[in-house]
Amino acid sequence: MFIVGLTGGLATGKSTVLSIFRENGVAVIDADEVARKVLDPGTKAWKELKEYFGDEVLNPDGRVNRAKLGEIIFDDIEKRRKLNAITHPRIQSAMIKMAVSYFFSGHKYIVMEVPLLFETGKMLTFMHKIITVVCEDHQQLKRLCKRNDYSIVVAKKRIDCQMPLEQKMANSHFVVDNSGEIASTKHQTECIIRTLRKSKFTWYFRSILLITFLSIIFGITHVFGIISNPK
């Protein structure tokens, strides 16, 4: 099995592309969904978050108010680092566990959506291929304003904090342009799916894993043989 990283910019349509992979029977891991579960009320991360940031970042039901939290950390580097220290290791651990589970379920590959894949760089070594989802600049700005109820000034500031899409595209194996109709996005994504299905990397990886496993088993058997039948 190999891992395909899916990334892009704010409001470029990563979730849309991920849903197309899911509809085509591809195993997917959504970093945003994992992040929400990591911060479910009562979890260790939630307790640490509450202790550091206080109740002001919580909704009445105890769940994290992500919009409020985002406002607090956006202009405060120390608080942003603290949030990352609380959440990132747990998110990465949960995603790796899911990937291992998919591997043993027999999936040829999985698509892992990581919004800040290039910015953090921590998951890059796990990615065999990378897909970047893009759209026109004015569309991204308009979509983000509508989705998060941001002013144009705030939305532009948030977008400018991320790596430019051009740079992400230059470091990707595939690019999905989500500027047009959904049918176009679906066609581009399904072309990538067909290409990934033809990859022989997974069989190479499985062969190496099998050889390693058999070597370990042989080594253990050999050791026990010596112990049971000493000369």
Image (tube, grey):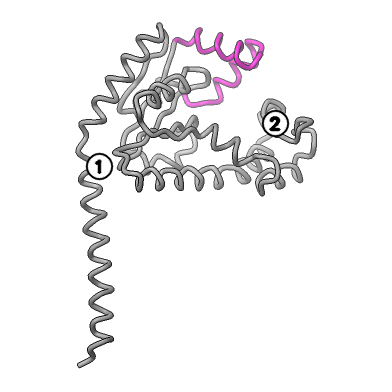
The residue located at (71%, 34%) in the rendering is 63
Instruction: Name the disc covering residue 202, or none.
Output: 1
Q: Position of residue 109 (x, y in %)?
A: 32, 37
On screen, residue 214 versus residue 12, left or right, reads left
Is 170 inside the magenta-drawn segment?
no
Mark 2 and 1 residues: CB-CB less than 8 Å, in contact?
Answer: no
Percent position of residue 222, x then y: 23, 77
Quadrant for residue 210, please give it.
bottom left
Q: How crowded is mark 2: few (under 14 residues within 10 Å), some or many (20 or more)?
A: some
145 over 198 or under it: above or below: above
What amino acid is found at the position of numbered circle 2 in the picture? Answer: Leu
Residue 211 falls in image quadrant: bottom left
Q: Which portion, as a residue range, is magenta? A: 136-164
The quarter of the image holding the N terminus is: top left
Give the image location of residue 185, x and y in percent.
Answer: 37, 13
Residue 98 x %, y %: 45, 44
Work out whether residue 144 or residue 1 is closer to the camera in this orientation and state it. 1
x 54%, y 32%: residue:
32
Mark 1 lies on a secondary structure that is: helix
Q: How many marks?
A: 2
2 vs 1, front mark = 1
In the image, residue 105 above or below residue 219: above
Q: Which one is earlier in the sequence, the residue at label 2 or at label 1?
A: 2
**Residue 143 lies in the magenta-colored region:** yes
Residue on which the image places disc 2: 69
Most common SS among magenta residues: helix
Residue kind at label 1, given as amino acid type? Thr
93 in relation to 11, above or below: below
Q: In this view, does 181 lie to the left or right of 205?
A: right
Residue at 23% of width from left, 91% of height from top? 230
Give the quarter of the figure containing the C terminus.
Answer: bottom left
